[in-house]
Image (cartoon, helix red, strand yellow):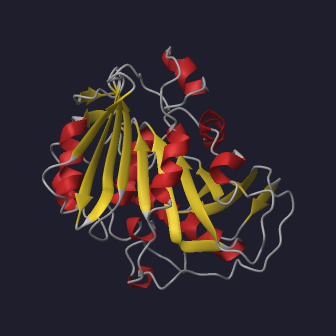
């Protein structure tokens, strides 16, 4: 089913406009009923003068009067939202039976930030803003509980959103996986300006990732930071305690790092799986693992992000 909506770009000429301040969220989508709940659907809109699209999956028992937590999932390069949806299994009721899943599609199969990206950072941030506007006007969204996750360049773009005070301010927490952080590296990390302190963020990364190396360096689309450096920058931005907690799991193959920030435990978290390659962490074989020539991991990113996200709500301004 394909639904076309009228662009709201004229009402929100720029994502940096004064009207962007959080006010509790638009609930005009509440009370509207929908067909085919529980089945993925595609929606289109116009953003920055370009036709864009995203997939949406509602719980099978969706109620038009219940405000739902909403997760945006950003696919990797040379891909679309549908493949990220299939790879992660985030539509499964065990993960999001009480949440709305949204899968935006990047221009040219990618997201902003890389030297091969088809869209600029401003255009893709505007697209996210327009998607949020469209969601709130058509579905019953809990604007205090909007989250973002993504893989590879999709994970890198999740970080880009988190570093933008206006668009990122609409989200409660972020969880990139195997992220290629082109807009938050050694040369430009000081440009990251999150909307508030602390800004919760969880990252997954494989120690055997040869595409987005744990130690950083030249990536497919530009310079990528070493993950320990990237984590330290987020710990500093969030005013975390200097000392973090580390728990080594599964015979020291998985390492969980957690920071306490402004008295809140677990605001910044990280899972490193030593033998994992460039893929989505999953205890069952998935498509990204097959593509990477990898095996299932000890941990499930799809499960872990649920408990992480549900710890945080977006405070009112």
What residue is shown at x 39% (from left), y 70% (from top)? 169
Q: Position of residue 228 (x, y in %)?
A: 21, 38
* Residue 142 picture location, percent across and down: 59, 73
User: Residue 255: which quarter of the image?
Assistant: top left
Which residue lies at the image location 83% right of the left edge and 67% below the top edge?
Answer: 34
- Along the line of sight, the residue nearer the viewer: 269 or 79: 269
Spot the residue most to the right.
Answer: 35
- Is 29 drawn above or below residue 114 in the view shown? below
Of 69 and 191, which appears nearest the observer?
69
User: Compared with residue 68, is residue 111 higher up or lower down, i.e. above or below?
Assistant: above
Q: Is 247 placed above or below 162 here?
A: above
Q: Position of residue 83 (x, y in %)?
A: 63, 35
Horizontal side, residue 9 vs residue 315: left or right: right
Q: Quadrant of the C terminus?
A: bottom left
Q: Is residue 53 visible?
A: no
Q: Position of residue 248 (x, y in %)?
A: 31, 32
* Numbered label tally: 0
Is residue 114 visible to the viewer in this orientation of the structure? Answer: yes
Q: Residue furthest top?
A: 293
């Amino acid at each position: 089913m394909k639904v076309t909506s009228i662009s709201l770009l004229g009402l929100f000429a720029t994502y940096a406009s004064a009207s962007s301040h959080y006010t509790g969220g638009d609930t005009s989508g509440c009370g509207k009923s929908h067909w085919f709940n529980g089945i993925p659907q595609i929606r289109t809109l116009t953003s920055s003068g370009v036709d864009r699209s995203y997939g949406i999956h509602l719980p099978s028992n969706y109620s038009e009067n219940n405000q739902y937590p909403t997760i945006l999932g950003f696919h990797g390069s040379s891909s679309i939202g549908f493949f990220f949806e299939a790879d992660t299994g985030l539509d499964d009721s065990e993960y999001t039976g009480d949440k709305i899943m949204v899968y935006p599609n990047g221009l040219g199969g990618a997201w902003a930030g890389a030297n091969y990206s088809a869209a600029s950072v401003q255009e893709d941030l505007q697209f996210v803003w327009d998607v949020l506007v469209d969601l709130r006007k058509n579905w019953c969204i809990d604007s205090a509980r909007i989250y973002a996750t993504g893989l590879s360049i999709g994970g890198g773009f999740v970080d880009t959103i988190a570093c933008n005070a206006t668009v990122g301010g609409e989200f409660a927490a972020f969880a990139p996986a195997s992220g290629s952080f082109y807009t938050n590296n050694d040369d430009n990390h000081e440009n990251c300006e999150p909307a508030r302190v602390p800004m919760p963020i969880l990252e997954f990364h494989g120690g055997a990732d040869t595409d987005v190396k744990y130690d950083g360096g030249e990536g497919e689309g530009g310079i990528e930071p070493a993950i320990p450096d990237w984590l330290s920058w987020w710990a500093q931005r969030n005013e975390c305690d200097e000392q973090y907690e580390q728990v080594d799991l599964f015979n020291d193959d998985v390492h969980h790092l957690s920071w306490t920030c402004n008295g809140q435990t677990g605001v910044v978290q990280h899972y490193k799986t030593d033998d994992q390659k460039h893929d989505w962490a999953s205890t069952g074989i998935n498509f990204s693992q097959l593509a990477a020539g990898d095996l299932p991991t000890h941990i499930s990113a799809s499960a872990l992000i649920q408990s992480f996200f549900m710890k945080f709500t977006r405070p009112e301004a």
